[in-house]
Amino acid sequence: MANGVSINPAWALHTTVSRLIGSGEQNIQNAWQTVLGIQPGTVPFIERHTEIVGLVGLITERLNSLPEGTRQKDIYLGYVPQWYDAVVSRNSWGNTQHPPAQLLPPDSLNLLAGLADYFDFTFGDSRSVLTDDAMQKLRDGLNEWRDLLVGAGIPAETVNEIRGQVDHLEWMLDNVQLVGNQPIVRGARELVGTGFSLMALKPKVAVTIGGVIMGLLTFLGNVNDGLDVANGILEGVADLTANVQELAGGEVPQKELPAAPSGPHIVPEVSNLNAGSDQNVVDAEVVDDDEAAG
């Protein structure tokens, strides 16, 4: 049994737009404030809203990756402009003549939910799970970054940059239902890159920085993205561990990595987010490799 969430970009966008429509607010500006929990027009709002707009880009990227002539590709791409307008709202957000309840026609919203199911089947999203354990490891790693930023002699501008990355990652973790899995994994990888750059900038604290990077690598190794991909991630983590040791010029504290998965493996069932529930746990069942491939 695996506890976690599997949120592909279509599910995340469906959840966000559904919350906007159901917010009960009189204008779109207030609806966004209710859903994202921060005043529109502020820098943190722009960061959060950008992640939602980015979901449309991820959806489009996936659809464009499908073979030409695929019927689903042609159907769903035709609705992308409507989904984009729903989160960008080219009409004035303060205009009460365009309330959030009218953001999308019901058939378009339902198609977005259908696309989420199609993505799960086609791209194996149901096997890419941010388990409770993985998310806790990422939170622990982010707390280590916060501790590192205090008194390590890191330039103020670099401290501010890293703190911004950490704050945004924490917000995405708290709102995985809205942004989905991909941006969180992407953000963790970007923070790893920042760490490597910082090791070259501050060699005196390279060992400490290396230990913090290992926390993020542990998280990445815990993201189950299917049998072959998960094993590949673990192999990559082992290589990165050696690189961290070399760059640090000393022994970096080791962190426990998850065991490589071997089938039969777990394929979680995706919760029906249209049911109005914000469950953070999905049920799972064991499926043989041959069954899953069929």
Image (tube, rainbow, N blue to C red):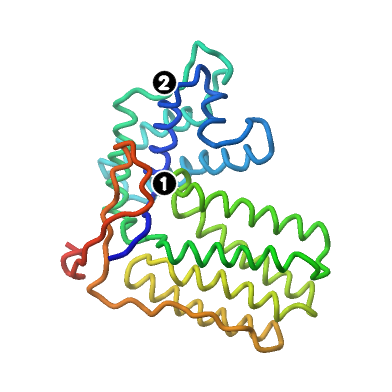
Q: Quadrant of the C terminus?
A: bottom left
Q: In the image, what residue type sits under mark 1?
A: Pro
| Residue drawn at 61 percent across, 67 percent down | 192
Local packing at callout 2 (Cα closer than 10 Å; few below 14, some 14-19, many 20+) is many
Q: Which residue is tagged 1? A: 9
Q: Nearer the viewer, residue 174 or 239?
A: 174
Question: Which residue does the numbered mark 2 point to in the structure image?
Answer: 101
Q: Residue furthest bottom?
A: 250
Mark 1: few, some, or many residues within 10 Å (few <14, many ≥20)? many
Amino acid type, callout 2: Ala
Question: Which of 90/97 is in front?
Answer: 97
Q: Residue at x 47, y 32 (%)?
A: 84
Mark 2, secondary structure of its residue: helix
Q: Where is residue 162 shown, x and y percent of the image?
A: 70, 59
- The image quadrant of residue 207 is bottom right
- Between residue 207 and residue 38, name the one nearer to us: 38
Q: Quarter of the image holding residue 262?
A: bottom left
